[in-house]
Every structure is written in C-alpha cells, then in structure tokens.
Image (cartoon, rainbow, N blue to C red):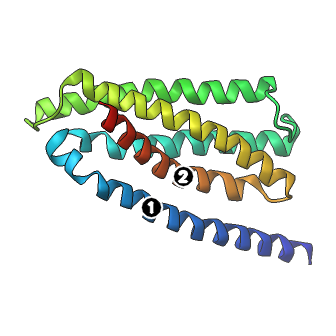
C-alpha cells in the first residue's frame, strides 16, 4: 500500500507542476512576442542569444535544484532559510557558471552573425545584453530555487518533483523578462 501512495503523490505533484509550467511557458512566449520589433528592427541579431540563454537557465537552475534536493534528502543541507556553507557553494557555483556561459553565448552569437552575414548589433552590445540578462535572471532564479527547494521539502513534497521542472520553466519567463529589461536599457 505505501508504494501506491508514493506513486499517487509523484503523479499528483508532477501533473500539478507541469500544468503550472505550461501556463508559465505561455507567459514567456507572450514576452517574446512583445519583443518582436526589438528583435527584428532595433537590435537585429538579438534572436541569436535567446534560445541558448533560455536553455542555459533551465540547465543551470535544474542542476542547482537537483543538488539542493539531494542535499536536503541526505541531510547535508538543513531545511532552513539560512546560508550554510553547502548552500553558499551551490549558489555561488551556479552564478559563476551562469556568468561565464552567458559571456560565451554572447561571443558565439557575435561570431555566428559575422560568419553567416547576419545583421546584428555590435559585438560588445550583444555580450553585454547576454551577460546582464544572464546575471539578472541567474540571481533571481538562484533565490527562487533555494526558496522553492526548502519550502517544498518542509511541506513534505519531493523537491525533485517540484523544483527542477518549475525552475526550468520559470527560468524561461524570467530570462525573457530580463532580456527585455536589458534591451530597454541598452
């Protein structure tokens, strides 16, 4: 009997979070749609950084969520909202990885635009947009990942069922909004 309860809990948690994720993805698509003119006219070439930045957010924060879930399950991380050494190491490494990968995405997008003759904003601006959007979304998502992991664990939910899919999806929305804000400033 306990095994069926676990299966039921996994299905309920998984289905609930996937429905929420679908709604969030629709919102992210709406933000992308509203950026249409900026992408095609004002800042051509910006479209080259959007897919990899979105993928980056999901990968980095999904990994962070998995590490935190494992740390919570094994007792390495206490389910408290305090900055333990384990939490500092995980958050710092995800932010450093985000910055390096965002800069790399900016450089590669610039090189691809040159290689294929795609009209694009200048090299430095593309890197600045990628790094700034990556940093803003990285900080926001790191905080949310920690909060959702600990909150779900405290509530008796499995953080592995909740946090990783939710952060990957929220990563898309928050990254799109971050890109939009950075583009407005640039």
Q: Nearer the viewer, residue 107 or 142?
A: 142
Q: Secondary structure at mark 2?
A: helix
Q: Quadrant of the N terminus?
A: bottom right
Please identify the residue farthest to the right as the structure is shown: 1
Q: Which residue is mark 1?
A: 27
Q: Position of residue 71 (x, y in %)?
A: 79, 39
- Dot 2, crowdedness within 10 Å: few (<14), some or many (≥20)? many
Q: Position of residue 93 (x, y in %)?
A: 61, 25
Q: Which residue is mark 2?
A: 170
Position above or below: 7 against 162: below
Q: Residue sitting at 43 percent across and 40 percent down?
A: 178
Q: Nearer the viewer, residue 136 or 67?
A: 136
The earlier-in-sequence mark between 1 and 2 is 1
Q: Which mark is residue 41?
A: none
Q: Residue sitting at 58 percent across and 71 percent down?
A: 19
Q: Secondary structure at mark 1?
A: helix
Q: How many marks?
A: 2
Quick check: marks 1 and 2 in contact, CB under 8 Å? no
Name the mark nearer the viewer: 1 or 2: 1
Q: Residue sitting at 26 percent across and 25 percent down?
A: 125
**Would residue 83 be seen by someone viewing this image from the given angle?**
yes
- State how far apart marks 1 and 2 are (Cα): 10 Å
Is residue 79 shown left or right of residue 44? right
Q: Quadrant of residue 45?
A: top left
Q: Residue sitting at 27 percent across and 29 percent down?
A: 126
Is residue 97 shown left or right of residue 147? left
Is residue 111 shown left or right of residue 26? left
Q: Quadrant of the C terminus?
A: top left
Please identify the residue farthest to the left as the structure is shown: 117
Q: Position of residue 56 (x, y in %)?
A: 45, 40
**Would residue 44 be seen by someone viewing this image from the given angle?**
no
């Amino acid at each position: 009997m306990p095994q069926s309860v676990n299966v039921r809990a996994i299905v309920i948690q998984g289905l609930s979070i996937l429905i929420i994720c679908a709604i969030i993805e629709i919102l992210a698509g709406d933000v992308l749609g509203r950026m249409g003119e900026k992408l095609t006219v004002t800042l051509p070439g910006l479209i080259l950084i959007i897919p990899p930045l979105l993928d980056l957010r999901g990968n980095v924060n999904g990994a962070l969520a998995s590490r935190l879930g494992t740390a919570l399950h094994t007792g390495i991380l206490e389910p408290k909202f305090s900055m333990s050494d384990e939490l500092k190491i995980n958050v710092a490494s995800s932010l450093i990885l985000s910055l390096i990968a965002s800069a790399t995405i900016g450089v590669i997008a610039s090189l691809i635009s040159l290689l294929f003759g795609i009209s694009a904003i200048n090299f430095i601006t593309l890197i600045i947009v990628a790094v700034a959007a990556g940093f803003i979304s990285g900080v926001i998502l790191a905080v949310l990942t920690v909060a959702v992991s600990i909150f779900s664990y405290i509530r008796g939910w499995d953080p592995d069922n909740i946090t990783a899919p939710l952060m990957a999806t929220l990563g898309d929305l928050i990254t799109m909004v971050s890109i939009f804000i950075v583009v407005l400033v640039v």
